[in-house]
Structures are given as C-alpha cells and as structure tokens.
Image (cartoon, rainbow, N blue to C red):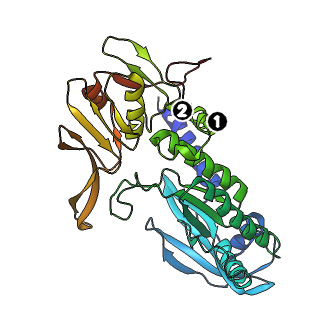
Amino acid sequence: MKKYAGKLVLVFFLMLLCVLTLSGCRHYKRDEAAEWFKENVIDETIAVSRDYTERKNDAGYTDRIWSAHLKDKPEIEFELISHATYSLFMDYTMETTYHLEMGKYYLDRYLEEYPDALSGFGIEEDRGGRMLDITAVYDTYREIRTLCGELKQLENYIAGQEFPCSMQYSLAYREPLTLLNEASPYAAAYHDTYVFETGDADSLEKKAQDGFARYAVTYRLGTEQLTREQMQDAVNKNGDYRFTITRADGMQLCYPELILRYSDSMTFGCLYEVLLREGTYDVAGTPGEFTFTSADGRTCSFSYSYHIPLECWSEEAGYYINEQYYYTEDGAQVLLSEEPFIDSDLFTELTGSSFDLIDSYSYSGQQKGDTP
C-alpha cells in the first residue's frame, strides 16, 4: 500500500513538473522579451531598455515593463510587458503596446493628410489597451457600407506603410428604443448589434449587416430597411432561437419566421407578431406599440417607449437612476426589467399559452404565419 502511495506521489510531482515546464513559471527576461517580439509581432530589430519597471496589473499582480523601439523608428516608443496572471499556478505571458503606439503614429499622419476622414468615428484604446479602436454608431442599415468604406481607406493607407500595424474597428446600431441605462453604473445595457474586427473592414461590414438583421427580426424594429430575403436569412442564421407555442388545449405550433432573444425571453415586438398570427386577441397597433385583450379579458398595452426612471443604490456608486420597462393592465403600470422582454410565465398569464425554445426546426413549403 505504501509502495503504491509512493508511486502516486511520484506521478503527481512528475505531472507538476511538466505543467511548470510547459507554462511560463517566471517573468520573461529582457532578451527573451525581444525574441518574443521578433517571433510574434514583426521580424524587425528593436532596441530594448536595459532595466525594467514594475507595475500592478488589473488582477493585482506585478508586471515587468521594458521600453522599446524599432531600430529604424526610434521616435515611436512602445512597451514590452511580461504579464503576470494566476490560474492554479503563476503564469507569465508577453504583451506589447507596439500596435497601439504605431497606430497613433499612423493615424495622426493619416488625419493630417485627410483631415475630413473618420469624422463620424470615435478613436479610443481597446479594452486591453494594446491597440486603437476606431468605433462608430450608425442609425440606418445603409450607413454600415459607408462607414466601412471609410475604414477600408484607412486600412489601405496602413497597408502601404513601411511597418505593419493592427487596429480594431467596431460598429453598433444606436438602438434608440431598446437600449436603456447605457451610462448608468451596474446597468445590464449593451448594444445587441455591437461587432468588432481587427484590421478587416470587409469582414466588419458583413458582421454589422448580420447583426442589424438579427436585431430587426428579433425586436421587429427597422424591418422596413431589409428585404424579405435578408430577414429570412437572418432568421435562418439564428434558427436555434425558434420556438414552439403550446396552446391551452395542448396544440403545438411554430411560426418559423419568428425568433426569441434568449432561450426564455421574447421581445415586445415578437409578442405582437405572435398575438397577430394567433388571431384571437383583438390586437391593435404596431410591433413597437400595441394593445390587446388578454386571455382573461384585461386590456394590456406594450410599447418600447414605456419605461420610467427608478432610484437605485449601491455602496460603490451611491444613489443613481436606472430606467425600467413596464407594460399596462387596464391602465395600471406593471414593472418589468431594464430590457423589453417577457418570459414564458408572463406570456402564459397573458395568453393562456406557453412558449419553449426548440433546438432546430425543419419545414418545407408555406406554414401558418410564414411571412416576415
């Protein structure tokens, strides 16, 4: 037994040795940092400061930072960072601000040459602080191509420079009716349509178009900006969010052109489309604002414009205001959440039916409600 236990201990220490050998178990040295840069960023000779400085990172561990520059570009200094993290064991990886500093240099020159370029964009560092993020918010589907065309011109300019440089591009629809509390602390708000890409404006354009189309068919807003084929394609790409309706009598059906936002959440606009297709709820209005008679005879009203400010408090932020959606029952407000969704329980309360996500749905030919 003791002999067996001893073998287990030996195996454990051998495995531990392998883990420590295969992972970075110490900070990089100066020459290792320079070699990493040549192998992973650009194969150019760089000058690296003899000494490093230390700085606490966001996780509370200490990074080591060397100042560096390309031999042929001494005016642009960047950092080589031996970054410390912890996951079961201490681990060390290399990072650099080369793309950030070179991006600033190229962008300054680009805007000097083309002062009217990128006027609709914001310029900031990406979340990691390692490269520039050129970002914009658009108001219509057609703007996507125009904005990406501007980014393509910048991309071509950078491609013509002596040294390579990566930038992040990002776009989002303004989502004027469904994005609340964007600037409020602890809010759940974010752009459903946010997309980003590193140095590829063509790919960003496709992602942004797909993101807007998904938003439109999910919330049933902005659908007039898309063709029938674009809407159907968006539904098909997000087919895992199709759902079944189970009526009170047990009958099940699916409207294959409608999708949920999450597995348990239906948008106001989707609710409108379901009620309209069911044909028994005396619905009046549009996907953005409508009234109907519930299964038990109440007059209910939903609108993306129905939200009120509520005072909230936290130890970190103190008192702050968050907007929250509501709907009305016979004129009385019923609070929901920061997002314009209803869950299956509320759907059942209002309609007597329920909805459930299905993993996939195959169908051929026309089915009831088969009209985006």
Which of the numbered marks, if any, corresponds to residue 324? none
Q: Is residue 38 above or below residue 109?
A: above
5 sits to left or right of 346: right
For residue 253, above or below residue 38: above
- Give the x, y percent position of residue 239: 55, 30
- x and y percent of residue 332 in the render? 16, 42
Element type where label 2 sits in the image: loop
Q: Amino acid at mark 2?
A: Pro
- For residue 140, which quarter of the picture? bottom right
Asked which quadrant contains residue 202, the reply is bottom right
Q: Which quadrant holds the C terminus?
A: top right
Q: What residue sits right under mark 1 in the picture?
A: 229
Earlier along the polypeptide chain: callout 1 or callout 2?
Answer: 1
Kindly indicate whether the residue at mark 2 contacts the one at mark 1 (C-beta within 8 angstroms). Answer: no
Q: Which picture quadrant has residue 179? A: bottom left
Name the residue nearer the viewer: 47 or 267. 267
Nearest the eye: 269 or 124:
269
**Disc 1, SS:** helix
- At a point 69% along the width and 81% down the height, the residue shown is 111
Q: Is residue 285 left or right of residue 358?
A: left
Q: Residues within 10 Å of mark 1 (few under 14, many from 20)?
A: few
Residue 333 at x, y = what percent? 19, 45
Q: Which residue is mark 2?
A: 372
Label 2: few (<14), some (14–19) or many (≥20) C-alpha neighbours in 10 Å? some
- Can the viewer see residue 13? no
- The answer, for residue 232, to whether it is visible in the render is yes
Eyeballing the image, is 67 above or below 93?
Answer: below
Q: CA gap, disc 1 to disc 2? A: 9 Å
Q: Name the kind of residue labelled 1 in the image.
A: Glu
- Residue at 43% x, 56% y: name it: 176
Residue 194 vs residue 164, the one in the foreground:
194
